[in-house]
Amino acid sequence: MKGRVNGSYENIIVMGKSGAGKQPRVDALTRKFGMKQLSTGNIFRHYLGLFEALGPRGPLDRFRDETDGAFLPDDEIQHALGISDRADADDVTLGLKAAYFVNQGRFVPDEITNALFAAAFEAMDYRGAVLDGFPRTEEQARFLKTLADRNGARLDAILWVENEDEAIIARALGRRICETCGGVYHMEHRPPPEPGGCDEMAPDCRIVQRGDDTVESLKARLREFKEKTEPAIDYLAALGIPIHRVSGNLPDYGAEAVEASVFAAMGVE
Ligand code: AMP
């Protein structure tokens, strides 16, 4: 299918397994079309950071009700954490819930994810978004479609970044991120320029491994993709949204090679 002319995309969805290499493709799209990345993973990491700033809190199971598997009421959680008086107590609680799922490599429940996504999408007036990591379930895909329709917004295309499980595991274990500026590096393919530094070289840049980049968590995320995200892609395809497939595993990882493969797949000059 012929792609749209430059700049006429309203919203693009980037899909792919966790660790497939979505970020460089998202960067290519935001640069080319002047769009903005909307990443639910980044939203969760923001809240998770608020919770983790409290310091080690031990296993999070104790904040769950053993009988029905749901979280304890928020006020009980906040009391147990000693944060009831804080103005951001609700955000920290959300961070605890995100940490519980994200660090195990499990999807955060649709109810929480959809609400956070809707707020971020509304803040962009439902336009100009490169959706990264959302939707990941059929329920989320239906929610997105309803939200877009209700606000007269288009979902123009899906970019599906494909990659083999083995390549993803090898790559994710070498991945390092800068906690301060969000820069993404790889110990083999793109080592951070200086120990503890990054391209921007801000004095407070800090290179770390993502808390969920462990073998167990990665395997769980790959299972989640197969069971939950593939049906979401089928649902979106059935709506007639064109799907453009690109390989997440190029021999050359440079920005130009990534751009060339993305725009060739989309039929964009
Ligand atoms: P990502 O950075 O996109 O790989 O997301 C990191 C983690 O955040 C995932 O492994 C999930 O635990 C959680 N997450 C991000 N987006 C979603 C989503 N749409 N639905 C459920 N969980 C999500």
Image: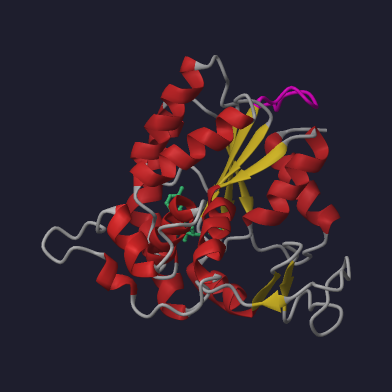
In this rendering, the answer to whether 244 lies above or below 97 is above
Q: Where is residue 20, by image quadrant?
A: bottom right
Residue in view at x 74 percent, y 75 percent: 206
Q: Position of residue 115 (x, y in %)?
A: 43, 38
Q: From this viewpoint, is residue 233 visible?
A: no
Q: How many marks?
A: 0
Does the magenta portion include 218? no
Does the magenta portion include 4? yes
Q: Position of residue 199 (x, y in %)?
A: 87, 68
Quick one: 170 or 75, which is closer to the camera?
Answer: 75
Q: From this viewpoint, is residue 156 visible?
A: yes
In this rendering, the answer to whether 215 lies above or below 251 is below
Quadrant placement of the C terminus = top right
Q: How is colour applied across the structure in the image? A: secondary structure
Relative horizontal placement of residue 19, taking residue 216 as reference (left or right): right
Q: Position of residue 49 (x, y in %)?
A: 56, 64
Q: Position of residue 81 (x, y in %)?
A: 39, 68
Question: Which residues are the magenta region?
Answer: 1-10
In this rendering, the answer to whether 136 lies above or below 140 is below
Residue in view at x 41 percent, y 35 percent: 141
Residue in view at x 86 percent, y 73 percent: 203
Residue furthest out toward the left: 67
Q: Where is residue 42, by image quadrant?
A: bottom right
In this rendering, the answer to whether 254 lies above or below 4 is below
Quadrant placement of the N terminus = top right
Query: Which is the main secondary structure of the residues drawn in magenta?
Result: loop
Residue furthest out toward the front: 85
Quick one: 33 or 259, which is closer to the camera?
Answer: 33
Residue in view at x 89 percent, y 71 percent: 201
Relative horizontal placement of residue 44, taking residue 188 as reference (left or right): left
Q: Where is residue 79, by image quadrant?
A: bottom left
